[in-house]
Structures are given as structure tokens and as C-alpha cells.
Amino acid sequence: MFKKESLYINVLKNDNQLKIDHRKFSNNLILETNSSNFICEDDILPADIAQKLNSSQEDTDFTYISTLLLSDTTSLVPKELSSKIKDCEIAKFNLEYDIAVLKTTLFETKNFFVKTGIDFIYSAFHIMNLYVEKNICRNEFLALIYNDKAYILILNSAGIIIDNKIMDLPTYQSVKGTHFYEDDLEAQKLFNEIYYFELNTIIQNCLSDFYSNHKNTFVEKVTLLYSLKQLDSSDIEKLSTELFLKVDYLPINIDEEIFELAKDIRNQKSFISPRKKRKKRDFKYLYFIIFLIVLIAGLYKFYTLLDIEVLKEKFSTKQEDFIATNNSLLLPDHVNLNDRIEKEIKAIFNTIADGISIDRFKLNKNSLEMELFSKDEENLALMRPLLISVFENSKVESVEKGKKQDFKALVLAKDFKNFNTNYRNFDKEYLNDEMMSNERVLEQLKIFLPENAIIRYLGEQQKDFLQYNYIVNILVKEPKEFFTLIENLNSELYSININYPINMIKKENIIEIEFNLDFNQEKQEK
């Protein structure tokens, strides 16, 4: 059959250096990769480079050009506040935050690619968020060092980002130019010393500012991600000693991360939408299609002359059948059902104060049971009024009487309050396939669910529609992976909804989540 090829091009500008990476795919398999570097001091992509990129776009219909902001003025904004920000463009970031960039900054980057067009524009913070999604980051100071800047995130014990900054770092040219060294070795040595001092100062100042505003979170680790290595192992050991913290210094492939962001169509976070791709016409197939149309028209005319009334009757019957079975309203609105559950869980998680972690979580349709670990009584006291805002009835108590610190606690709650009625709805048309057997549904679920998912079939229910019921067990590093799964299910054109009970159990560095899942489909008339 027809082969679909796509080409992804990363164009990254760093001072006067321009790095271009190509990666060509055919049906999601990599065909070829190549990389090149150029000198570029202009504010617009030079004509010779633009011509090469345009030539690549002419050769491959589905070509996507991606880049990072030329000057990054981004900041993370809580989702409930992002709609109120002016003079900025807003893009998705994660479950808690959107990311904002000045419109002037975004225009500068788009204008750089005016000769070629641009499909995806990201911030360095997007690269960091990918790292956070793939790794366990708790009570951590995380910095990406790229393009003479330090992009900084600080995460709490739940792995949630609670602070972010962008800080400037010294450049080699500025140090060499300021101190007038003729010897390049001496200039490099001086730069290394200044660079280390500035980086150390930035980390200490950021931590000091952070502690002045966040009393209940303590950073236990510093992770520095770099695309160009500047520090050696002795520098890292020295930095760890001076900060009294564990310090990891890890390489990161910026191009690889951008390729991953650009190819993730379901969870697109770019500041702009990709350009529409128009496939060039292949006239061989056009002539073939015209021939088929003429042939079909001739056959239709022939059979019409033989028995036009019989054909009319059959056509009428088929059309009535189509209308009867093409009714998505018969199926449960899976987006609405999933959104309700997601908002309930997030509302519960928002009651967890600093110093408290969840060991076991069980949510039924209108009740909650949680086993907690609390560092002290004060943290538990902060949680009680938050639970009251979510449930009509709630009870929080220690199960280790007499212990004031590092004890286990139990939460029992029931009767959700009407805390949020703004639920999302499915606004498309459900796929109206032929009736799917349990075996076929299981194959579909294996595509939608994580690779580690264990699926058990419970049975079926005959309602106005046919419903298959399953129990699903998955392993995740963070609850946000469960929310991502819900978002992916919401994007499907099948009615698939999460159902109660929902159980989460913490096991060392992973969380085991078990939940019911319903697959709904229309009954087919026999």
C-alpha cells in the first residue's frame, strides 16, 4: 500500500552557531538521520540555509520544523490564572501549570523562520518537563544549563513543581574580553573559575529565596542537566560539599527531546500549531480514480435500466439502517465520566499537606479511604479543613496513638460536595464499527493502555448498549501518569470510561493502580 514518509527537522540557534538535525521516518520507522552546523549571525534564517530547508520540504510532504525560543522569557503559571495574563501566548505544560511567553519573544522566533515557516516552538522548560515525567524528582532542585542560561525548577515531596526561574550564566567571550587575556589557556582557566563561582552563587541564592517563601519543603538533591559539559567531577564534588547536598551532573540530548515533543501529537505543547500539510497530487492515481468513477457510473446506469425500482428500495433500506445505528447519544459520554473522576482525585490530592504521603488510596463512587504517613501532628491538622471543603463527612485520625512524629494515619470520608460542575463533554462522533467481541476489545485496550497493564475481563452488561467490564492494573512512577492515561482515553473515538473502585498502593518507588474500566458499544440489530 501507500507509504507515508515524514521528516522532522530541529533548528537550534546558539549565539552565532546554527545546528540542524534531520530525522526521516517511514511508518514510524527511522529511515535516515543527519546533522549539520552553520555560522549564523543574522536575525533571519540565511537564504542558503532556508533554501536547503525548503528543498527538504518540497521532497517530503509531511515535513515538520521545530525549534526552541531564541530568547526564553517563559514562566510557569497555575492553570487557573493563565487565562488572565495579558501580552503573552499560553501553551500547555503539565497537569498543574501552563507556560507563558511574551508575544514579542514568540514573534522574534517566528520571524527568524519567515523564509521557511515553522511548525513547533518550545521552551527549555518543556525539555525539563519531559525529564520530570521520565524520572522520579522529589524535593529536588533541577536545572537545565543551555545557551548560557540556567533554567531552574524546584519540586516538592509529591514531585510537583512549586518554583521556577531563569538565570543568566557567564559566557567565555565576555570573560575573555573583560580581562584582556592574550593566552587562550589562561582565559579558559579564568572562565572555568568564574563559571563555577557564578553557578554556585545562583544555586545558593535560589535556595535561599525558595526557603524564605516555602517553609515546609526542603531540597534534598541538586540535579544539573547539561548539553555541553563545562564542569568536571572534582567541581561536582566540591559543589556538593559546599551545598551540603547530593549533586548529579547529567548529560541531556536536546535534539532527542525535541523530536519526542514534536512527534507526540496527542499531547502537543508547542506555542504554535503546526502548519497544515498538503500532499502533492500524483496524477497516476488521479487517472486511475477517474477511470474507476467512469466504470462505476456506467455499471450504475446499466443496472438502473434493468430494475430501477428494486435499487431504490434497497438504497432506502440501507439509509434507514444507517440512520438507526449512527446515534452516538446512545453511548455514555466517556469524556464527562472520566473528567468527573479525574477532578475528584485531584481535589483529594489537593488536601494532602506538605509532610504527608499517601500509602494506600481507595476511592468508591461516593466514599474515600486513605492510609497516610505524616511527619508530625501539625501537618495532619492542616489537612482536616481541606477535606471538609471536598466531603460532607470526613474523619482523620492517627492509628499510632501517642506518637507525635512519623506516624500512620487513616482518612475516612463520604458524600462528595458539589465542588466542580464544569465537566468536559465528548464533542465528536463515536466510531460505529461492527459489533466487537471481547477478544477484539482486549486488543484495542492493549493499544490504549501502558505496556505493563494487566487486564482482567469481568463480564458484560446488556443495557440500551452493550458494555464490557474489566479490571485494569498498572504500575506508574507518579499519579500524573494516571491522569495522562485518562487524557489519552478521552481523545479516543470509542466510549471507554474509568469506573470505581480506584485503588492506589505505594510500593517503594512505584505506585500500583487498579481500577475498573468500561468499554461501551452500540448493539447491532440482527
Image (cartoon, rainbow, N blue to C red):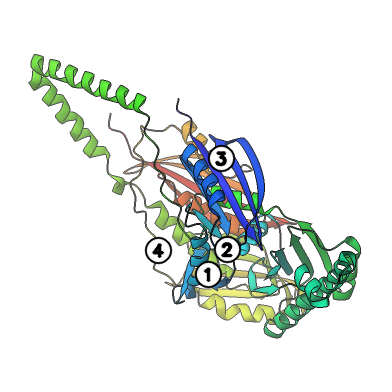
Q: Which label number is shown at residue 105?
A: 1
Decide if residue 288 is on the left or right side of residue 189. Answer: left
Pointers 2 and 1 in contact (C-beta within 8 Å): yes
Between discs 2 and 4, the one toward the N terminus: 2
- Image quadrant where one finds the N terminus: top left
Between discs 2 and 1, the one toward the N terminus: 2
Relative image position of residue 311 (x, y in whole percent): 13, 22
Mark in front: 2 vs 4: 2
Residue at 59% in and 79% down: 384
**What crowding class fits label 1: few (fewer than 14 Cα within 10 Å), some (14-19), or many (20 or more)?**
some
Decide if residue 138 is on the left or right side of residue 24. Answer: right
Is the residue 169 above or below the residue 14 in the image?
below
Between discs 1 and 4, the one toward the N terminus: 1
Residue located beneath label 2 in the image:
69
Relative image position of residue 393 (x, y in whole percent): 51, 74
Pointers 1 and 3 in contact (C-beta within 8 Å): no
Decide if residue 107 is on the left or right side of residue 303. Answer: right
Relative image position of residue 525 (x, y in whole percent): 27, 32
Residue located beneath label 3 in the image:
456
